[in-house]
Image (spheres, helix red, strand yellow):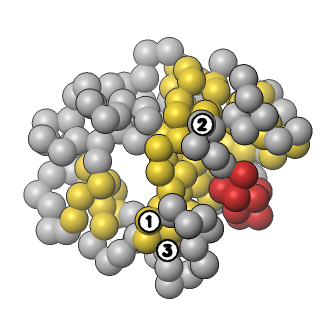
Amino acid sequence: MTPYDMVLTKRGLRMGGRIFPCSIGKGGISSQKAEGDGATPRGTHRIVGMLFRPDRIARPTDWAVPILPGDLWSDAPEAEDYNTMVRAPYPHSHESLRRADPLYDLVILTDWNWPYPVPGRGSAIFIHQWRRPGYPTEGCIALGRRSLHRIARQIRHRTRLIIP
């Protein structure tokens, strides 16, 4: 473990000597993650990207990628581009990355079931803003806005998300 790792604990997400309150998936933590189960997958996950809404927030890091109108995330196990960012129009099941609410104003991407996704194993696990404290996600890790932005600035090349 390094000082730049994020570790999920019973008290929250620990990083850089601090604990940040967070929410996890409504399905709890699972070693057998599957598409649609609402679970947060156990394991060590690398941080592989960061997305942000340039019309709402400043670029959080120099390597963050803007979320543009028409950006989507494929969650269709049968699709060739399952568990990747795609563009509208898109004929398969997907999630819009450009939401009306602030949940995806800043998104930290993990390598869950990526870059070679196994159909049905579950699409992306993001670290994003929560709806409200304690409100469960569909499997992602969610934090308060200030905590999320603070963590985003601390991420380094070898940062990992560890879910024991």
What whole-number distance in Å separates the C-alpha atoms at marks 1 and 3?
9 Å
**Disc 2 residue type?**
Arg
Q: Residue at 44%, 35% (x, y): give it.
A: 111
Secondary structure state at the residue bearing disc 1: strand
Instruction: Tell me how far mark 1 sits from mark 2, CA to CA.
Output: 18 Å
Tag 3 or tag 2, which sits nearer the N-term?
3
Q: Residue furthest right?
A: 17
Outermost residue on the bottom side: it is: 55
Quarter holding the C terminus?
top right
Residue drawn at 30 percent across, 67 percent down: 71
Q: Position of residue 78 (x, y in %)?
A: 13, 36
Q: Earlier in the sequence, mark 1 or mark 3?
A: 3
* Dot label at residue 158: 2
Where is 147 relative to 89, above or below?
Answer: above
**Image height of 40 relative to 88, above or below:** above
Q: Which residue is mark 1?
A: 65
Q: Circle 3: is it few (<14), some (14-19), or many (20+) Cα within 10 Å? A: many
- On screen, residue 6 versus residue 111, left or right, reads right
* Rendered image quadrant of residue 75: top left
**Residue 94 x %, y %:** 27, 54
* Residue closest to the eye, 4 or 13: 4
Q: Which residue is tagged 3?
A: 53
Q: Give the amino acid at mark 3.
A: Arg
Q: Quadrant of the N terminus?
A: top right
Q: Residue at x 58, y 43 (%)?
A: 157
Q: Position of residue 148 (x, y in %)?
A: 69, 57
Foreground: disc 1 or disc 3: 1
Q: Nearer the viewer, residue 64 or 146?
A: 64
